[in-house]
Image (cartoon, grey):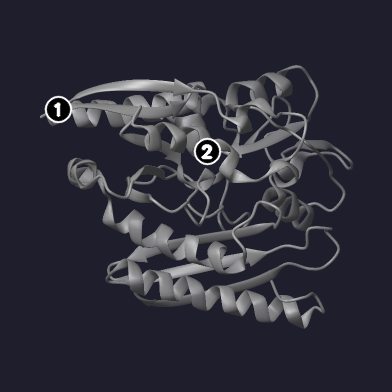
Amino acid sequence: MRNYTIATRESRLALWQAEHVKALLEQQGHTVHLLGMTTLGDQILDRSLSKVGGKGLFVKELETALEGGQADLAVHSLKDVPMELPEGFSLACVMEREDPRDAWVSNTYASLDELPLGAVVGTSSLRRMALLRALRPDLKIEALRGNLDTRLRKLDDGLYDGIVLAAAGLKRLGLQARLRAAFEPEQMLPAAGQGALGIEVRSDRADVVQILAPLLHVPTWLAVSAERAVSRVMGGSCSMPLAAYATLDGDMLHIRAVWGDPEGVLPLVHAQARGLAVDAAAATALGEDVARQLQAGVAAQGVAAV
């Protein structure tokens, strides 16, 4: 047993996630400390992520702490983790997934269907924008950045008729009462890794990988391996409206994905695959197959292959 330090962002949700991992490691007998950090992604709130560098903005500072030895592991919302990690880093553990769905949050309207024509909905996710436009082309979609509490406060200040958030974050912070409705995957397919926690380490830290082994949830690991494979083949960037969601039934994995036109003009492209997924390699292969289907569908619309 020894001491370990977890690098984490300092938002309330990120700290909850780090405290959750801390408690599980302490149950093993380890002493665990938190190293709170502010990332560039937390600081830049006036522009969409797709315009300022993407998801890596939420992990760079934490990786610097791992590299310099100030921290031993970093806890992330997996959907914020780039599909390709820098050399010398690895995704050591994926924990059991919370609710992967998107959540409808509004102080006035119980569901998206209740919104009047031209209502204002807040989100900065290009995926959510594309899927919302497909459901309700009449909506006015406006940018919404900031941590979960900041987004809820902007809604409460009357800037939006409703906003879309990850259900997992609301549930983890005990804010289920704010969740008016959850979008089923058939309505709004989640982002790759949504609802799951990923733990990043330096690739040479076999000791940390070993203590994380009991936290690994294999069904979630297989599902997100397929999802992240779709995103990786498609470019793995936040500048593309892309959804990927996998479910496991025994050894059979079902992976679905949706590509959206960044300009919101072309129709959505859907793809899916089913197959045996007894390990991460098989799950990854299924995700890659779905990505190739998407690429073919995108090319058929006259768009350059992704």
**Location of residue 159 in the rendering, given as x and y in whole percent from the top left corner:** 80, 24
- Which of the 4 image quarters holds residue 115? top right
**Location of residue 227 in the rendering, given as x and y in whole percent from the top left corner:** 48, 62
**In the orientation shown, which residue stands out farthest toward the front?**
68
Q: Mark 1 points at which residue?
A: 2
Q: How crowded is mark 2: few (under 14 residues within 10 Å), some or many (20 or more)?
A: some
Q: Classify the position of the N terminus by image quarter.
A: top left
**Location of residue 207 in the rendering, given as x and y in whole percent from the top left corner:** 18, 43
Amino acid type, label 2:
Lys
Which element is circle 1 on?
loop
Which element is circle 2 on?
helix
Residue at the image position 39 percent from the left and 22 percent from the top: 35
Q: Mark 2 points at which residue?
A: 60
Amino acid type, label 1:
Arg
Could you give the CA–CA distance between mark 1 and mark 2, rounded to whole angstroms? 26 Å
Residue at the image position 34 percent from the left and 56 percent from the top: 221
Kindly identify which numbered label has been placed on residue 187: none
- Which of the 4 image quarters holds residue 69? top left
* Near-viewer residue (220 or 53): 53
Would residue 263 be found to the left or right of residue 113 on screen? right
Residue at the image position 75 percent from the left and 44 percent from the top: 51
Q: Classify the position of the C terminus by image quarter.
A: bottom right
* Near-viewer residue (83 or 178): 83
Would residue 214 be found to the left or right of residue 271 on screen? left
Is 15 situated above or below 252?
above
